[in-house]
Amino acid sequence: MLTASFPDQIPILLRTALGPRWEFTVDGRHIEIRHPQRGTPYRPPRRTLNWGELLALLEAAFAAQGIPRAPCLPLRWGRETELTISAIQALDPLLKFGQTFSYREGFLAQPVVRFTGERDGCGALRDGFLTAFVNVSCVQPIHELDQYATAFDQWLSVLSRLGLHARHITLDGRLAIWRRREVEGITLRFRHAGLALGDIVLLWNADDPDHMAVDLGTGLERLAWARSRHTWPELIFGTYSEAAPVAVLDAIRTATLLLGHGIIPASRGPGSITRRVLATIPPDLSPLGISAAIRSDHDFWTSVEKLPAPWPAVTQLAEKELRRRRNGLQVGLPPTRGRR
């Protein structure tokens, strides 16, 4: 298979899959695909879906395209990364090791922890980014290149079921092959009414391009943001958005996911990530504790997958770590730091 021809084939295949209505602009290696009715204003639906309703609608929309929902990957990854950082890791056997299987395929709503979110000049996370979020992906091994274009056409149908219609979708990027160790790929990004939503990636094993897959990904929270256009802190943190700085609320949310999976604070390994996250929460944040916020976050994560630890146990573990840090600071000891 001549992978060098992939960048030239992709525009042709997308034209075939999307039909003649779409406008294609190809300038060198840059491509932009827009709907001719893109100028119509976007009006959010009157009713905002709760997280469970949004996930159920996504699952039904993918199922209508013949794509079933796959169970989540374990949050504790323990291979190249301590934690699962992307649903694309489900494709590791196929893409990295040249095997004929993947850990998961289909629609995947995967909780992940990632410290690479965009930040402003003061170091605060920008709107649209979180340390822990639900990576909504469609991960599929493919055998023919036209399946890549078909996957995007199916995605447009899924978005339409959510009220995000094709006329507000733009697809653009560079038709250039990148390489990361054993894997090569081409990435194009899509937006909804100007809001960055996610990307669709064609991937293959660099030594054996017949081991090929497509990963179409976004975030559940970003989908809800695009659909509702509510302010980001209010959408994510609800009634707690004014109770503490966003960085603290983000840390509580992330710690709830980690502790809910039994990843308790430790000096090494995955537990060091939990300790690192909790270290950003002021120990004296509230004399009444953080149980209410944890319960709210626990409800969110449970809407995606059942957490092994109930919210009272998560609260006890979090507050125990905060007491440990507070007592250490009171006697003049530096707080324990895990590995970065």
Image (cartoon, helix red, strand yellow):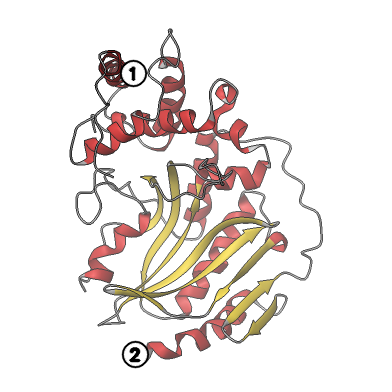
| Residues packed near mark 2 inside 10 Å, few (<14), some (14 to 19) or many (20 plus) | few
Check disc 1 and report the residue beneath it. 315
Q: Residue at x 68, y 79 (%)?
A: 24
N-term mark: 2 or 1: 2
* Discs 2, 1 touching: Cβ within 8 Å: no
User: If the image is split into quadrants, where does the N terminus sit?
Assistant: bottom left
Direction from residue 214 to residue 263 in the image, left or right: left
Nearer to us of marks 2 and 1 is 1
Residue 111 on image: x %, y %: 38, 43
Residue 310, compared with residue 280, is above or below; it is: above
Say which quarter of the image contains residue 3: bottom left
Amino acid type of the residue that numbered disc 1 sits on in the rendered structure: Thr
Q: Residue furthest right?
A: 40
Say which quarter of the image contains residue 38: bottom right
Q: Residue furthest top?
A: 287
Q: Secondary structure at mark 2?
A: loop
Direction from residue 278 to residue 27 in the image, left or right: right
Q: Residue at x 45, y 85 (%)?
A: 6
Residue 295, compared with residue 261, is above or below; it is: above
Direction from residue 27 to residue 55 in the image, left or right: left
Q: Secondary structure at mark 1?
A: helix
Question: As rendered, which of 227 and 297 lies closer to the eye?
Answer: 297
Residue 300 on image: x %, y %: 45, 31
Residue 5 on image: x %, y %: 45, 90
**Could you give the CA–CA distance between mark 2 and mark 1, rounded to whole angstroms?**
54 Å
Check disc 2 and report the residue beneath it. 1
Amino acid type of the residue that numbered disc 2 sits on in the rendered structure: Met
User: If the image is split into quadrants, where does the C terminus sit?
Assistant: top left
| Residues packed near mark 1 inside 10 Å, few (<14), some (14 to 19) or many (20 plus) | many
Q: Residue furthest front?
A: 332
Residue 140, compared with residue 16, is above or below; it is: above
